[in-house]
Image: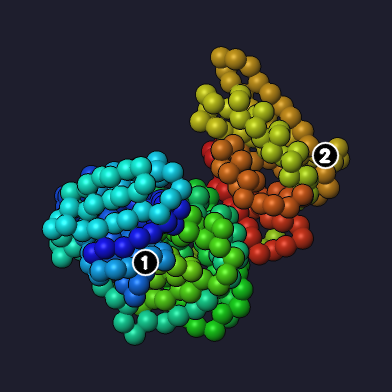
Amino acid sequence: MKLQVTQENLSKALSTVARVANTRGTLPILANVLLKTTNNRLSIAATNLDIAITEYCGAKVSEEGSITIPARLMQDFISSLPPSVISLELDDNKLLINTDQYQSVINGVPAEDFPVMPAIENGKRVTVPGAELKRALQQVVFAASSDEARPVLTAVYMHSLDGTLHMAATDSYRLASKTMGKIKEPVDLLVPVSAMQDVLRIVHDFDDPVSVTYNEQQVLFKAGEVELVARLIEGKYPDYPKLVPKKFANVAKVKRADLVNITKVSSLFARESAGSIKVTTDENKGTLNIRSIASQVGENTASAEGNIQGSGEITINSRYLLDALSAFHSEEINFTFNGKLEPVVLSNPNEKDYIHLIMPLKS
């Protein structure tokens, strides 16, 4: 293998790919990245056996070849170099790296030992606008569970319903649900949240269409020169639409910034009680009130004015409320609930494509 590539392109590709490399796995080679020439381009790939990311970058290839090298060392080294043209040359299992100022050698491992994710055969394919996928992931992924005891809840559920694409995540204490664009193919995918977090990083500055190819075992996201393959989680996702109430006895339409502010202040007094805050709506005064108590320090009550229908009370987790509010981009927010035992549902008064549900705490 012998080629030339710019420091900027190589550093960008390594930063995208190397985060997947697993330094704690039982297979030492999983801590490496695979460098391989393909059609006069350089491909950089890494995998942890559940997720694999590959990025292609333009290069001037003189000799074809491949090698795997330590991901962390390669990433840190290339990112430290000044902008320049980098020459890469393979000598047995040693990668020679040369620039105008630096001459380095990194010991590698033959590419034949590197595990490859199987190709998706007979897969179906849909296309999603990059900006739309980014917005959906930002609003959903944080609600997924990290508890491996219930694998299904560690997934982001990407599915079709009535010809529309939906994305949802829940940890059983909260639920985020996003309605996306129209779709023709039936979709029913349980994608690991760790993979979706990587997809979000990939599409962060990407607005062009993202292709999603899938079968029963795997899914492939392709955004420009980057490809991510992930193994799907097996199981049946909860029938979450049934959890969302159709009508509400208490509806508070308030400014989102006001609700964020009073929740932040109230959360300071809720630290002793694991973030527990009591939210009340007062139709007569036209206010939504939050009360929190810290037995050793004191207590706090804060109010936000708004359009209030109904007077009720519910206890919820302040951190979950702040997380949910940060996922909205609207100036106003609907804070709606029924009794103390039913969930709070947050939504944008002007758009119904995203809702966030928070389960109540025992008060």
**Badge 2, how many Cα within 10 Å: few under 14, some, many 20+?**
some
- State the quadrant of the N terminus: bottom left
Indicate the secondary structure of the residue bearing disc 1. Answer: strand
In the rendered picture of this protein, how many numbered marks are placed on residues?
2
Instruction: Describe the colour scheme in one phrase.
Output: rainbow
Task: Name which residue type carries label 2.
Answer: Glu
**204 or 35, which is in the foreground?**
35
Residue contact between numbered discs 2 and 1, judged by CB atoms under 8 Å:
no
Note whether residue 329 is visible: yes
- State the quadrant of the C terminus: top right
Residue 313 on image: x %, y %:
68, 40
Is 262 displayed left or right of 27 in the figure? right
Query: Residue at 38% across / 59% down in the picture?
Result: 5
Question: Mark 2 — residue?
Answer: 305
Note whether residue 242 is visible: no
**254 or 362, which is in the foreground?**
254
Query: Residue at 70% across / 60% down in the picture?
Result: 247
Indicate the secondary structure of the residue bearing disc 2. Answer: strand
- Find the residue positioned furthest to the top: 296
Query: Residue at 41% across / 66% down in the picture?
Result: 58
Question: Mark 1 — residue?
Answer: 60
**187 or 91, which is in the foreground?**
91
Residue 110 on image: x %, y %:
15, 60
Is 194 displayed left or right of 291 in the figure? left
Task: Name which residue type carries label 1.
Answer: Lys
Residue 358 on image: x %, y %:
57, 48
**Badge 1, how many Cα within 10 Å: few under 14, some, many 20+?**
some
Residue 115 on image: x %, y %:
20, 63
**Nearest to viewer (mark 2 / mark 1):** 1
Asked which quadrant contains residue 13, the reply is: bottom left
Asked which quadrant contains residue 242, the reply is: bottom right
